[in-house]
Amino acid sequence: MLSNTRHTDMWVSFGLAFVGGYSDAASFVLAKTFTGHVTGNLVLTAIAVAADDWRAALEHLSAIVTFLIGISLSVLIMRSLKAWPSLPIMMGIEVILIVAASLALSSGMGHGVAVFVVFLSLALGLQNGAFRRVGGISVHTTYLTGMITSLISATTERYASEVTPAGSTDPKIGLLCGIWVAFFLGAGTGAAMALHFKALGVIGAALLLTLLILREVQS
C-alpha cells in the first residue's frame, strides 16, 4: 500500500510530466527545437549542419547546453536549500523562466526565439534535476525514452518471473504508466495551446506549476 507521502509524490510527478510534455511540444511548435531533452536536439543539430543551416544548429546546441546547465544548477541549489522546501522553490524559479521565455518570444525582441529556447531549456533542466525519484524509483518528467525502457523492462520481468503472485500489481508499473500518459496529454495540450495562442500559450505550463507549488506548500 502506498503511503500518503508516496501518493503526494506520485501526483507531483504526474503534474511535472504534464508540464514537461507541454513545454517540449510548445517549444517545438514555436521554435522547432526540443527544450526538455538532449537526444532529439542532437539529431536536429546534425540535420541542420548537413543542411548548412548554422543558425538552427546553434539554437539546438544552445538548448542542449542550457538544459544540462539547468540539471547541474538544480543539484547545487537544492544542496544549498536543506532547511527550505527546495522543490517548491525550484518550481517557482521554473515558473519565472517559463513566463520570461513566453514574454521574450511574444515581445518581438531581437533574438527572441533564441532567448525563448534558452530560458525554457534552463527551466526544464532545473525540473529534471530537481525531481528524480518517487518512492525509491528513478523517474524523469521531461523525456520518455528511459521511462518507456524501464516500463517495458519492469513489465517483462514481472510476467516472466515464476514467483509473481497472481493478481498482484507492481506500483512501479503504475507510476511509470501514469507519467507516460501525463507527458503525452501534456504534449498534446501544449501543442494545441501554442498553435492557437502562440508564445502566450506557454504560460499554461506556468499556471499548472503554480498549482503544484500551492499543493506542495499546503501538504
Image (cartoon, grey):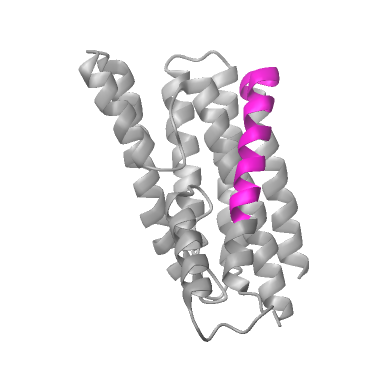
Observer-nearest residue: 21 or 205? Answer: 21
Is residue 92 at all visible to an observer of this figure?
A: no
Q: Residue 99 lies in what quarter of the image?
A: top right
Q: Position of residue 103 (x, y in %)?
A: 59, 25
Quadrant of the image containing the C terminus: bottom right
Q: Position of residue 93 (x, y in %)?
A: 56, 49
Q: How many numbered marks are there?
A: 0
Q: Residue 179 lies in what quarter of the image?
A: bottom right
Q: Residue at x 56, y 45 (%)?
A: 20
Q: Residue at x 71, y 55 (%)?
A: 212
Observer-nearest residue: 121 or 138? Answer: 138
**Image-based side of 12 in relation to 70, left or right:** right
Please say if 167 is above or below 26.
Answer: below
In magenta segment, residue 187 = yes
Q: Residue at x 57, y 41 (%)?
A: 21
Please say if 162 is above or below 45.
Answer: below
Q: Position of residue 167 (x, y in %)?
A: 69, 78
Q: Which residues are magenta?
A: 179-199
In magenta segment, residue 196 = yes
Quadrant of the image containing the N terminus: bottom right
Is residue 42 at all visible to an observer of this figure?
A: yes
Please say if 136 is above or below 86.
Answer: below
Q: Position of residue 181 (x, y in %)?
A: 64, 49
Observer-nearest residue: 63 or 171? Answer: 171
Please say if 166 is above or below 93.
Answer: below
Which secondary structure class fits the magenta region best?
helix
